[in-house]
Amino acid sequence: MITQFIERQRTRISTFSFALLGVAAFKVLDLPLPFLFGPLFACLAAALLGAKLRGFGVISKIGRVILGVAIGSSLTPAVIHVLPSIALSVAFIPLYVILIGLIGVPFFERVGKLDRQTAYYAAMPGGLQDMVVFGIEAGADPKALSLIHATRVLIVVVVAPLLVSQLFGASLDRPIGAPAISIPGHELLLLALSGVIGWQVAERLKLFGATILGPMLASAILSLSGAVDSRPPAEALIFAQFFIGLGIGVYYTGVKLKEVAGLLAVATVFILILAALAAIFTIAIASIDMGHSQLDIFLAYAPGGQAEMTLLAIISGADLGFIIVHHLTRMILVILGAPFVARLFLTRTKN
């Protein structure tokens, strides 16, 4: 018993070390999202070399709770205030999501040779973390989902800044976040409580993806009521990215290089399909919405993660309210709708 405990802790320490090396490598190479993708890809490399990996249980869950609070606290009264002026553009988001699903599920089934559960969550344009979490709970293949969504987000966050600076001529030098010391203590406490209470209530209610949904809803209530004006501090988001990346990375244990190469190829092709679809929507909406630039619309419909696109909007000086509403609408539709649609869709398919 004691020997097994010691062995588990040794495996955790080595996994943590791999993750830190990943962060360092991404920092040195100046690659995007080092605290998320560094641990994720370092664990992938370690798994390919045959290393044993082990997650951190509740600590990784806390990372997902912080993510939920960050998404919910982005829904502010100021964002709600601009809704009437952007309603036409936002109205296209459900169609955008439906088209992605209609194209993506058959694509991953037929081309990627994935089972229906995995194909469904691989196609859904939600965040990397939430889609992997929901997919795992639905019985999908975590390794396939991790690789596919990591590839989607990675390509988008690498290519999008290049397009923003080169195609739209925007600079990327604005400050991106607030440290904990600059946020009022009572707001930090309320954000923390919204995460913990939202998580626990959602678990009691047996909500799908309780670690994200509960905190997201609880923090949104606080934000809309005016009780808080801040998002989680930069330090908390770094913590969340690190342990979420590590938590996803441990699912690569036992993965084969041939499997990885095939999934990466399929994911890359799907990204090209998403890019074409996003370009069509950008051009179409820009022709009828004269109040916003193509940069705003591009970032609003870019198929990346909500957090990453929000950060890009901040540092590029784009219309943050416009972009957040679109991504929150997409995320809410996917996060709240995907599990229920999946249950109905997958059940009917089996019958």
Image: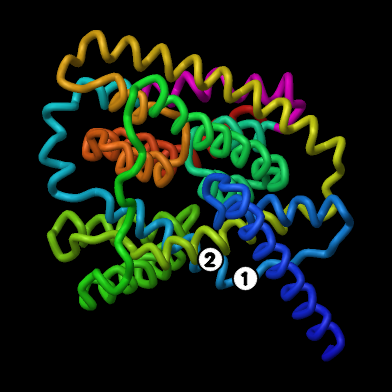
Query: Who's the residue at 67% across and 25% down the image?
Result: 108
Determine whether, in the image, residue 258 is placed left or right of residue 330: right
Residue 78 location (% of width, % of height): 13, 45
Determine whether, in the image, residue 172 is placed left or right of residue 55: left
Determine whether, in the image, residue 112 is placed left or right of residue 219: right
Residue highlighted by disc 1: 57
Type of amino acid under label 1: Gly
Q: Secondary structure at mark 1?
A: loop
Q: Residue furthest bottom?
A: 2
Viewer-proximal residue among 240 and 138: 240
Residue range highlighted in magenta: 94-115
Q: Quadrant of residue 217?
A: bottom left
Can residue 340 be seen here? The reply is no
Residue 253 location (% of width, % of height): 80, 55
Viewer-proximal residue among 108 and 302: 302
Residue highlighted by disc 2: 61
